Image (spheres, rainbow, N blue to C red):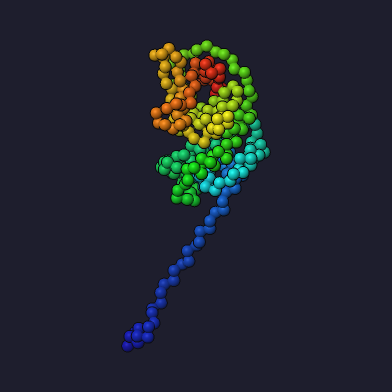
Amino acid sequence: MTALLLTGCGQQPPQPTQPEQPIAEEQPALTLAELLADIYGAAPGTAGSSLKAARAAGEFLDWSQQPDTESEDAVRQWVEENVPAENALELVLAWNEVLNQADALLRGDETAAGGLSDAGYAMRQDSYDAELVTQAALELSPLFTQLLDRTERTPYQGEGPGDYSEVTEAAFDGVWVNDGADTLLLFSGEGCRVVDPALDWYGETAYAFRVRDRSSMGYCPALEIDFRESGNFDAPLAYYVSGIDSTHFWCSTGSESFQKLI
């Protein structure tokens, strides 16, 4: 009878207490200086460079969604204060790798996503505005252009034709700067990044490239870069390559030579 009376009075049996769930604290937004330091620390060949590049790529993508039109001057100043001239190439390699990783993350590449997870970084957003990412890469352009500023200009030395059979896509893998130190080319499996301030190209995009055999016409090979992203190399950026070796390639028709940095 007691049990029936308690129920009739509207009383409920005691409920188990649920433990309070901790509230996840949102991590503070990364500062520009912190982002740049993480990019600089991701130079290939250094300890843990792959994980560092993956983390820096995630950080860059998150940072890119909050545009800062004054970043370029701040980046230039940071480089001057933190990167010795002898480390100019190291910074270029690090930024190139971070951009490659960021591109892979945007494509939904599972390997890149796995690397980001291994690096212990969680993306802040579910999707990213590609135009903002490109704009952010342009704002960080001094990470590339600083190498041009620190490279000695040398006069072009004319050379005769080399062995055209050695001019292959694989032969261009690496980083090249021309003798006038106004163009930087970065070739990798991701494509070719072109840094040419006179043409407003700052390496923000990795373009497809190819070597076109023109021997049937009696001409040297053409290195073609699909900067229009046409997919069929319609009106590409072209270099007519007279020869290539382990140290440089040269274009007699354009009176231009590119030295291989790595």
How far across and how far down the image is residue 200, in percent? 55, 33
Give the answer, above or below, for where 154 lies relative to 160. Answer: below
Query: Count of labels shown?
Result: 0
Image quadrant occupied by the C terminus? top right
Give the answer, above or below, for where 23 lies relative to 222. Answer: below
- Relative side of 155 to 205, left or right: right
Residue 33's quadrant in the figure?
A: top right
- Relative side of 258 to 77, left or right: left
Residue 169 appears in the rendering: no
- Relative side of 58 to 14, left or right: right
How far across and how far down the image is residue 259, in percent? 56, 22
Q: Residue furthest front?
A: 235
Q: Residue at x 48, y 26 (%)?
A: 237
**Which residue is at the front of the view, 104 or 215?**
215
Q: Residue at x 38, y 78 (%)?
A: 13
Q: Residue at x 55, y 22 (%)?
A: 258
Q: Residue at x 59, y 21 (%)?
A: 179
How far across and how far down the image is residue 1, in percent? 32, 88
How far across and how far down the image is residue 28, in percent? 57, 53
Residue 217's quadrant in the figure?
A: top left
**Which residue is at the front of the view, 55 or 217?**
217
Residue 251 appears in the rendering: yes
